[in-house]
Image: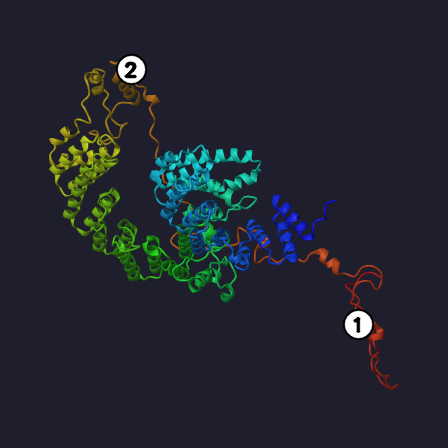
Amino acid sequence: MASEATPLEQAFDKLNTCIKNQQHKKALKACDEILALAPGDEDALRCKVVAHMQLSEFQQAIALLRKPPLAALPLGFEKAYCLYRLGQIEEALTVAASSLSAPDLDAAGASRLLQLQAQLEYRRGRTRDCIHTYDKLFQQYKVDSLDLKTNVLAAYVAAGLSSELPDLMTALKVRAKDSFEVAFNRACGQVAGGQLAAAEGDLRMAIKQGRETLFEEDLGEEEVEDELSPLSCQLAYVLGRLGRQAEAGELYDKLIRCSQPIRDEATRAIANNNAIADAPQRLEPGPQNRKYINSATRKLEGLVERPGAAEGGAAAGGDESGGGGAVGNLAGLLARHTPAGSLPRFTGDLESRLGADQKMQLLLNLGLLYLVAGRPEAAKELVGVLAAAPGAAAEPAVALLAAAVSLSQGKTVDADRTLEAFCASCGSGAPGAPPASAALAPTLMRAQTALQAGNLAVAQGLLAGLRDERLAAQGALVATRVALYEQMGDTAGAELLLDAAVAHWRSRSGEDGAASALAWCLSCAIGLKLRLGKLEEAKQAFNQLQSYGVSSTAAGAATLTRLARACALADPSAAPGLVAPLAPPPTGGVLARLDLDALEEGAIRAPGGPSGRGAGGGGRSGPDLAAAARAIGKRGGEAMDVDQQPKPKKSRKKRKPRYPKGYNPELPNGGLPAPDPERWLPKWERSEFKKKRDRRRREKDAVKGSQGAGKVDESLDRTKVSVAPAAAPDSKAPPVKPNLPPRKGKGKK
């Protein structure tokens, strides 16, 4: 006969059953029962840590891991993972690296730690290190799983190596049809490369494939949509960049206002941000957009953790009236409590799910909303936090936002100094310095600020100092500089600029778009030379323009018209030869169909001709004119029916306006009293309306029923009336009359 199990064995059997059934809450209770029987049991404590991790209770799990006896055990993977989910990326990387250097680490444990380390490096923005870690997994540990290959594709996209994705997918032997995650990552690479149309097709294919895969796993409709929410959010972004704002807005509304909120907080945050960014018409300053701007500001503020909220003493959210309130208070809290060299913490899983670039973009958009809402002080505090964050020195958007804050406060000199300092650091080669291309937007903002201040020469010098030759020869920039030269009276500088742009694009004739850019520059040069009176040079430029086949377009025809008009004024004999290739003389067949005699006989005199009368005066009658017009094409066998020709519209006579009685158009409001602003409201809603007392309310106050019911006049109770002392017999005081109610009227008795 088998002996009965001890209580400790029964508790372990219960724990084993809970773990097999994935009942993690019951597993925690079973662990507590074991620890009550055997305090400090390592197996029970490790099971309790795993149960906490399965329930996303990472704070409780890391607290157990830091206490003995688990603190002395080699549980580096569990510690690093808990720290990662708590948003402590740097500390998690340190724990993972120290665990990988342990001498007694087996291959399975090293593989797990390397996968976690690659994920941590990806979240930290160190994408190149992440790619090297995945290469080590593939080459040294021979890991060959579709999930890791999918993660490698995402790392290449984040590292800016989207152009290498096709070769990488061939080397890894993966296709977009293998899983919807692979198709999604390839679409992200196409978005980064500017191939938006191809990305839309891949995203739609990935969503369709994902639905089929997840439905096969017996997931419900809402669960499937929740799993595919990142793909829908990316598709909405692509549609917005393609200019299809209505379709993008529908997808964003579906993600944000769905019946069941999306579990992925990162996707929900990005959807809210993109929906705000894709509605610029709702962000225009004005009372009509105040409510939307405040709502958008609160949405982005809700993504950021409020540090030291108890100290600040402000509740979350802002007021609808547009005042400062708690909205500006968040920026103050961030400025006081965010450590230097770090970004503010985000709420929940956003801290670990969002990358550094995504966090920076969300905070920059929050600063822009502060500016739009008329809160420059809050925007200034937020800019101070962003400027001290890692990588902010190489981010042109931070410098642009700081300059915009200074401009909103009227500090033009401070804004120009901020932008000038950033442009000076671009391309300097110092560690963490931005590239030379990052100076474009700040330089254009400096030029715009100089133009608004009326400094044309400063703006011209800034635009001339752009280092990118291809950008400097673009049509929009060339046209702006030519207009500035003309406003400054420097036509020679404008002519030299156009000649340089023409020479630049002629040297790059084999590139895409070079022919159209050269044609535009030639058209602009022809117009300038015509204004300067250089007719021969304009003809030479037009001959070059004809060689590109642009003269047959609408822009070329307009240029030809201006050139022919100028030639006709200066040299009448040159104009026919200029337009001859485009307007050939009529052929013999066309001339043969014309009856010259009929044309001569049917000539119609114009109003005010030699007879001095109108068209119907001394000329032919109406039927004769119609007959002559029909006879014009008789030789060709065709007659023109004048009755079918469109008749000219009769000009309507301008009638004198009729004004109301007493109206004088020279006075404000016609001299009439101002209209009642409440004339559109119903009468009972107007301020001067006096509401009559309801008859039912009067009857309600009346005394009804038998005597004694309802309200009773206390003065009628004789028992409560103080009795005066009896008067002397010889007193002549009048008798006391009863207090009766007054009669309403006299009538027949």
Q: Element at badge 1?
A: helix
User: Quick one: 520 or 96, which is closer to the camera?
Assistant: 96
* Amino acid at pointer 1: Ser
Residue 243 position within the rendered picture, expressed as x and y whole percent measured from the top left: 39, 40
Q: Quadrant of residue 627?
A: top left
The picture quadrant where one finds residue 195 is top left
Tag 2–tag 1 contact (CB < 8 Å)? no
In terms of sequence position, does the residue under pointer 2 or pointer 1 come before the other?
Answer: 2
* Res 619 label: none
Seen from the viewer's position, the closer of residues 34 and 611 is 34
Is residue 394 at all visible to an observer of this figure?
A: yes
Residue picked out by circle 1: 715
**Nearer to the camera, 329 or 622:** 329
In-image side of 417 versus 379 (left or right): left
Vertical comparison of 67 with 22: above or below:
below
Q: Measuring 35% from the left and 44% from the top, which residue is drawn there?
A: 160
Checking the image for residue 638, the label placed there is 2
Q: Is residue 341 above or below residue 249?
A: below
Q: Count residues near mark 1 (Cα–Cα under 10 Å), then give few for <14, some for 14-19, many for 20+.
A: few
Q: Residue at image x 33%, y 29%?
A: 648
- Which quadrant would residue 385 be assigned to in this image? bottom left
Camera sees residue 291 = no
Question: At which x and y percent is residue 276?
Answer: 44, 48
